[in-house]
Image (cartoon, rainbow, N blue to C red):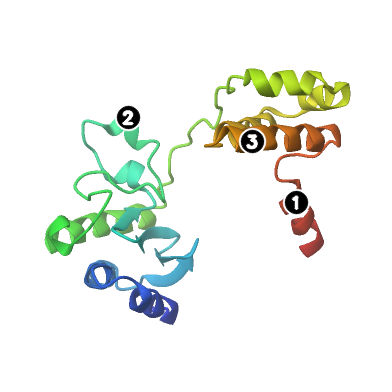
């Protein structure tokens, strides 16, 4: 027999009124399609496990989402090549909308149950998700950031020695600034941190090490 997690009851209760019937219906269908499913909370959202991750749901301010962990293998449509990129946290493959605003947006119970049972079969058979390349192209270096780094030999040298992922974190942080004033402040802070050999998320890393 499956198990229910009281934290999911609380999650549904705290959700917006429009979301409650959607989440309740999806939860009921998951248990119907997989009687041995185990409920839990992952990343702050309701999740369902059966011999590994199965599926999950979430409620937001104006919509809900429902997705399968192995969506890449679950949907065999003309966009199969794109499915290799679809995993947990990326719902929206047909026939499930990416944004569910009412129960009417969902397919029939029979269609959802069929998807759940197919996902259960994948876990029963131990089928794993295909490996995808995590290599990303380097982001272009912002000219103002580059100019600021050149003014500090130590910062420039440290930045050059950073891994591609560390460089990307700094560049993304700077380019995501919406205001020019914010951008310039981030550049100044980045140069200061980099000169000290600090990565973008050094504060979190320090906290994590202490916790360990």
Q: Is residue 207 visible?
A: yes
Please tell me how crowded label 3 is: few (under 14), some (14-19), or many (20+) other residues with Cα within 10 Å.
some
Disc nearest the viewer among 3 and 2 = 3
Q: CA distance from mark 1 to mark 3?
A: 14 Å
In depth, the one of 63 and 47 nearer the eye is 63
Q: Quadrant of residue 151?
A: top right
Please tell me how crowded label 2 is: few (under 14), some (14-19), or many (20+) other residues with Cα within 10 Å.
few
Q: Position of residue 24 (x, y in %)?
A: 26, 73
Whether label 1 touches label 3, CB < 8 Å: no
Q: Position of residue 185 (x, y in %)?
A: 69, 37
Q: Please, which residue is most extreme toward the front here?
A: 181
The residue at which mark 3 appears reads as 169
The residue at which mark 1 appears reads as 203
Q: How many marks?
A: 3
Q: Earlier in the sequence, mark 2 or mark 1?
A: 2
Quadrant assignment for the C terminus: bottom right
Q: CA distance from mark 3 to mark 2?
A: 28 Å
* Secondary structure of the residue carrying numbered label 1: helix
| x 28%, y 33%: residue | 80
| x 87%, y 21%: residue | 153
Q: Please, which residue is most extreme toward the bottom here?
A: 6
| Image mark for residue 81 | 2
Q: CA distance from mark 2 to mark 1?
A: 39 Å
Q: Is residue 124 above or below residue 191?
A: below
Q: Is residue 212 visible?
A: no
Q: Position of residue 157 (x, y in %)?
A: 84, 22
Q: Position of residue 203 (x, y in %)?
A: 75, 51
Q: Is residue 114 left or right of residue 204?
A: left
Q: Is residue 64 above or below residue 10?
A: above
């Amino acid at each position: 027999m499956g198990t229910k997690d009281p934290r999911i009851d609380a999650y549904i209760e705290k959700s917006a009124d429009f979301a409650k019937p959607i989440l309740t219906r999806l939860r009921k269908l998951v248990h119907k399609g997989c009687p041995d499913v185990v409920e839990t909370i992952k990343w702050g959202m309701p999740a369902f496990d059966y011999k590994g991750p199965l599926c999950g749901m979430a409620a937001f301010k104006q919509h809900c989402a429902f997705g399968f962990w192995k969506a890449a293998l679950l949907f065999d449509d003309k966009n199969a090549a794109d499915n290799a990129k679809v995993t947990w946290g990326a719902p929206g493959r047909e026939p499930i909308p990416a944004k569910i605003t009412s129960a009417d947006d969902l397919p029939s119970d029979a269609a959802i149950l069929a998807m759940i049972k197919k996902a259960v079969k994948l876990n029963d058979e131990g089928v794993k998700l295909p490996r995808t390349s995590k290599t990303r192209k380097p982001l272009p270096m912002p000219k103002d950031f580059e100019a600021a780094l050149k003014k500090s030999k130590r910062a420039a040298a440290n930045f050059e020695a950073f891994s591609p992922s560390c460089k990307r974190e700094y560049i993304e942080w700077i380019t995501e600034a919406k205001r020019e004033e914010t951008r310039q402040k981030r550049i100044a802070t980045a140069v200061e941190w980099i000169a000290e050999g600090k990565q973008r998320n050094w504060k979190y890393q320090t906290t994590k090490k202490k916790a360990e």
